[in-house]
């Protein structure tokens, strides 16, 4: 079993839709959970960060972590064409410099106007 | 441009060539990373440097050779590559205590091996 599983999509939705992106993982030592957004021909940029279990909201974005199920989600409300990108989940067990992030494959999202 | 600059943006090289990728960070971070991104695969960690010392070499073939002369610069030296090495090579940096949420990526070097 891969450490982090993420459905690569592609996922196509109309503007204004609610989008749900998900990852599952196998390593129970993971404590730090992130979502990165990557536009075409760009490097990934941090979108959301959560420590341990719980929810975090930032504008139209909500990140959820369920450590008991080893499952994380990213919800996008009122999706916009500018949200079209690849979304990568990432996680790590520690927070020191030099700690490697383990990534999912990424889900490609297309929001049509 | 972000706080992490990668050059060149695109590189085409033959299998017998030697080339180098350069990464520079202007953020005062003390850890730097090389990742490989291939289509339909997760980002693969290649090398980690913390305080200019290599702390992880993730079973990368010896045709890839990293160099970290100081905390702001990171190089990836390439020689006798194979076509399957064609990918986007991403550099990132982070600060101690922010290993998770503190990653800043460059825009990458798109490498094509012919």
Image (spheres, helix red, strand yellow):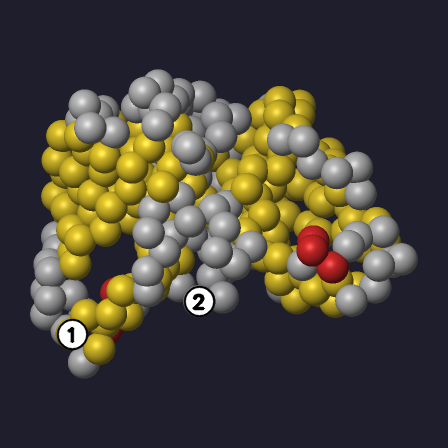
Rendered view: B9 above or below B46: below
Alpha carbon separation for disc pair 1 and 2: 20 Å
Residue A86 picture location, percent across and down: 36, 59
Residue shown at 28%/70% (left/top)?
A110
Please give the label number shown on residue A14. 1
Please identify the quadrant where the N terminus of chain A is shown: top left
Rendered view: A57 above or below A53: below
**Mark 2 belongs to chain:** A
Q: Helix, strand, or loop for circle 1?
A: strand
**Mark 1 belongs to chain:** A
Locate residue A62 relative to residue B25 in the image: left or right.
Answer: left
Mark 1 and mark 2 lie on one chain; the one further toward the N terminus is: 1
Rendered view: B8 above or below A28: below
For mark 2, what is the residue? A40
Residue shown at 75%/42% (left/top)?
B64
**Residue B104 in view:** yes
Which residue is the extreme one toward the right? B16
């Amino acid at each position: 079993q891969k450490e982090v599983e993420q459905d690569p999509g592609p996922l196509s939705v109309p503007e204004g839709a609610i989008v749900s992106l998900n990852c599952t993982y196998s390593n129970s030592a993971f404590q730090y959970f992130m979502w990165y957004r990557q536009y075409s021909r760009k490097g990934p940029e941090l979108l959301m960060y959560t420590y341990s279990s719980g929810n975090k909201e930032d504008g139209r974005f909500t990140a959820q972590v369920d450590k008991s199920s080893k499952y994380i989600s990213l919800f996008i409300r009122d999706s916009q064409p500018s949200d079209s990108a690849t979304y990568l989940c990432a996680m790590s067990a520690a927070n020191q410099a030099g700690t490697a992030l383990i990534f999912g494959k990424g889900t490609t999202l297309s929001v049509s106007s | 441009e972000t706080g992490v600059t990668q050059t060149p943006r695109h590189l085409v090289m033959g299998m017998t060539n030697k080339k180098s990728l350069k990464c520079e960070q202007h953020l005062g971070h003390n850890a730097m990373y090389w990742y490989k991104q291939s289509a339909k695969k997760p980002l693969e960690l290649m090398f980690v440097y913390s305080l200019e010392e290599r702390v992880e070499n993730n079973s990368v073939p010896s045709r890839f050779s990293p160099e970290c002369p100081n905390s702001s610069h990171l190089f990836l030296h390439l020689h006798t590559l194979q076509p399957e090495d064609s990918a986007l090579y991403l550099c990132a940096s982070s600060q101690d205590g922010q290993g998770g949420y503190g990653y800043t990526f460059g825009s990458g070097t798109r490498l094509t091996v012919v």
